[in-house]
């Protein structure tokens, strides 16, 4: 008998492992809900459920209340949703989380309520001076504002100097394609009266008639401000990113793709993950605003290290971001000659990296589509998930090419719709969501935070379903400020609609923000729908956005956000 008992013990160890047997994690049961699982086709009743069960980080059951309650154990946590609507966690497939963290911490002069611009110099100086006094230990004063990016109407360092002269001040343009620096920050850039060595950077240094730098850096020239930005301590960056994660969770955002970044930024997310302080899943692209890639040994080593080390559910890489054009001036400048862009894309694809390309102009979109088509013809078909970011202007003849080439259209509904739209051809709709969707293209939605503020997915969903036209008196006369945008910079709806035929349904917009964005991030096997086996990422809403008046969807707020089975915002 003793021998038999020993044999049983040995069998138990062989089945369960040599360590102690761990008890199952108590389940969390969400019941009495109106749960949009995003499974099945658009409009299908099968996409809805009443309840679901979570064990650990994953969904283990979805069904009717009676079915889920049968799983109730002694230690299960039961959350009564009281009929509230639940959607999969929002996957914001294009943002800049580090810049957003800076803006969240810094002085934000452009909000849905109002925009303080250089045309209000006394108020701008007063606000900046007060902010600096309230943050005496900040090594760098950070801000966000609407200002002209079209020389010679750009602002100058002197206005910022009136507020803060003893510390560097960096004001990010709301487009994130321009910086406005005070004299202290400019001194750190190394810019003199002589041209800087890199001609692409020099083109973005705004100078006066005498050749003196004015304090505004456009597009690639923003890299020259790196010496000033590097004064922000790593611990401060980590604290800002932690706060940014909590802020995104409050909007139902559970995953993000960072559309710019480098190895150093990825390591910040990894540090927060290792500390248990990262509450949004991140995938980060290599790329800097309007800067051409050069495949140096150092860059290739960083790309390879990022791909090798960071590929889990919280911190991932393997994405390279290009800029085919910029976003400043009266007409966005081109960044690449088509031949050079194609050579770089071909080389990085050969190495197995996913490619995303910023393209605002219709001719840029056409060039990128041509390159992607040539890539598939040359290298053969595989699951590349090629992306075009923004695609505000698309030649109608190019719309069906997105589906034909399996190119993802990653778009930001809050950029739509200024009174005149974003397309230079007033007869052609910018942001043709319905046409893309009808052609079979994959739509992925995002905020481009902090280019939009706040990164509210429900304002985006409202705009996708209504295409309201918006106007901001504060920014309407700023040269180079092409978009007022939905609920941005003190903008208000005009009562008009912008190409209403390009509206899409609320359900289609939600899918673009969940399934579509997860697909664009190679994470659709883990997030984007509420399905057994997937990660338990979801948001509980204050109203049913699927039946609400579309003009009220933007007022929706999140009452609870769960990421990986843990409540990260709100309370049951």
Image (cartoon, helix red, strand yellow):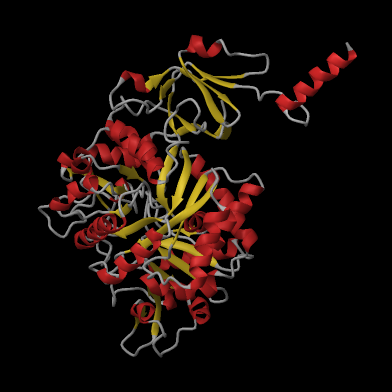
Quadrant of the snapshot with the C terminus: top right
Is 165 on the left-hand or right-hand side of 48?
right
Residue 212 appears in the picture as rendered: yes
Q: If the image is split into quadrants, where does the N terminus sit?
A: top right
Residue 559 position in % (x across, y down): 49, 31
Residue 371 relative to residue 299: left or right: left
At which x and y percent is residue 430? 20, 51
Viewer-proximal residue among 507 and 378: 378
Q: Residue at x 27, y 57 (%)?
A: 372
- The front one of 81 and 212 is 81
Question: In the shown orientation, is residue 141 left or right of residue 198?
Answer: right
Residue 290 or residue 316, whichever sits in front:
316
Up-down relation of residue 296 to residue 452 (above or below) = below
Tell me residue 373's x, y (percent).
24, 56
Q: Residue at x 33, y 73 (%)?
A: 154
Q: Quadrant of residue 328?
A: bottom left
Q: Residue furthest right?
A: 2
Asked if one can make out residue 146 in the rendered structure from this viewpoint, the answer is: no
Q: Quadrant of residue 571?
A: top right
Q: Give percent across and percent down for residue 39.
A: 37, 26
The residue closer to the viewer here, 140 or 160, is 140
Question: Is the residue 231 above or below the residue 517 in the image?
Answer: below
The number of numbered badges drawn on the structure is 0
């Amino acid at each position: 008998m003793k021998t038999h008992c020993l044999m049983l013990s040995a069998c138990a160890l062989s089945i369960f492992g040599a360590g102690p047997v761990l008890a199952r994690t108590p389940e969390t049961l969400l019941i009495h809900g109106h749960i949009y699982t995003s499974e099945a086709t658009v409009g299908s009743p099968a996409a809805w459920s009443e309840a679901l069960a979570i064990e650990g980080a994953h969904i283990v059951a979805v069904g009717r209340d009676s079915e889920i309650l049968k799983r109730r154990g002694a230690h299960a946590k039961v959350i009564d949703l009281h009929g509230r609507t639940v959607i999969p966690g929002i996957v914001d497939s294009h943002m800049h989380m580090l810049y957003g963290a800076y803006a969240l911490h810094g002085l934000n002069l452009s909000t849905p309520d109002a925009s303080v611009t250089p045309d209000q110099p006394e108020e701008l100086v007063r606000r900046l001076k007060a902010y600096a006094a309230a943050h005496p230990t900040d090594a760098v004063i950070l801000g966000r504002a609407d200002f002209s990016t079209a020389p010679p109407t750009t602002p100058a360092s002197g206005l910022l100097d009136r507020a803060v002269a003893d510390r560097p001040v960096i004001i990010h343009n709301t487009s994130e394609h321009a910086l406005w620096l005070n004299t202290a920050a400019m001194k750190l850039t190394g810019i003199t009266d002589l041209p800087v060595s890199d001609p692409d950077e020099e083109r973005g240094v705004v100078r006066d008639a005498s050749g003196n730098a004015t304090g505004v850096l456009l597009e690639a020239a923003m890299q020259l401000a790196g010496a000033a930005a590097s004064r922000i301590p790593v611990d401060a960056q980590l604290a800002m990113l932690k706060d940014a994660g909590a802020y995104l969770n409050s909007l139902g955002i559970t995953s993000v793709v960072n559309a710019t970044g480098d190895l150093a930024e990825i390591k910040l997310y990894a540090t927060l993950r290792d500390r248990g302080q990262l509450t949004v899943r991140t995938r980060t692209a290599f790329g800097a605003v309007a800067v051409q890639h050069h495949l140096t040994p150092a860059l290739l080593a960083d790309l390879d290290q990022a791909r090798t080390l960071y590929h889990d559910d919280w911190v991932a890489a393997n994405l390279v971001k290009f800029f085919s054009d910029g976003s400043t001036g009266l007409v966005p400048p081109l960044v690449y000659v088509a031949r050079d862009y194609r050579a770089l894309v071909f080389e990085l694809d050969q190495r197995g990296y996913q490619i995303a390309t910023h393209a605002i102009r219709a001719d840029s979109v056409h060039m990128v589509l041509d390159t992607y088509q040539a890539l598939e013809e040359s290298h053969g078909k595989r699951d590349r998930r090629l992306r075009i970011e923004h695609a505000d202007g698309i030649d109608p003849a190019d719309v069906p090419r997105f589906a034909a080439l399996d190119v993802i259209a990653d778009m930001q509904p809050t950029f739509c719709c200024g009174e005149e739209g974003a397309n230079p051809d007033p007869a052609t709709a910018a942001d043709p969501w319905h046409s893309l969707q009808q052609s079979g293209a994959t739509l992925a939605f995002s905020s481009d935070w902090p280019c939009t503020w706040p990164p509210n997915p429900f304002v985006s969903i409202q705009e996708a379903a209504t295409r309201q036209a918006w106007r901001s008196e504060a920014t309407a006369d700023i040269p180079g400020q092409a978009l007022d945008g939905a609920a941005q910079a003190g903008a208000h709806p005009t009562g008009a609609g912008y190409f209403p035929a390009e509206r899409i349904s609320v359900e289609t917009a939600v899918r673009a923000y969940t399934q579509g964005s997860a697909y664009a991030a190679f994470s659709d096997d883990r997030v984007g729908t509420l399905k057994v086996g997937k990660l338990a990422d979801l948001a509980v809403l204050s109203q049913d956005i699927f039946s609400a008046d579309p003009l009220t969807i933007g007022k929706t707020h999140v009452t609870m956000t769960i990421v990986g089975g843990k409540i990260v915002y709100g309370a049951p």
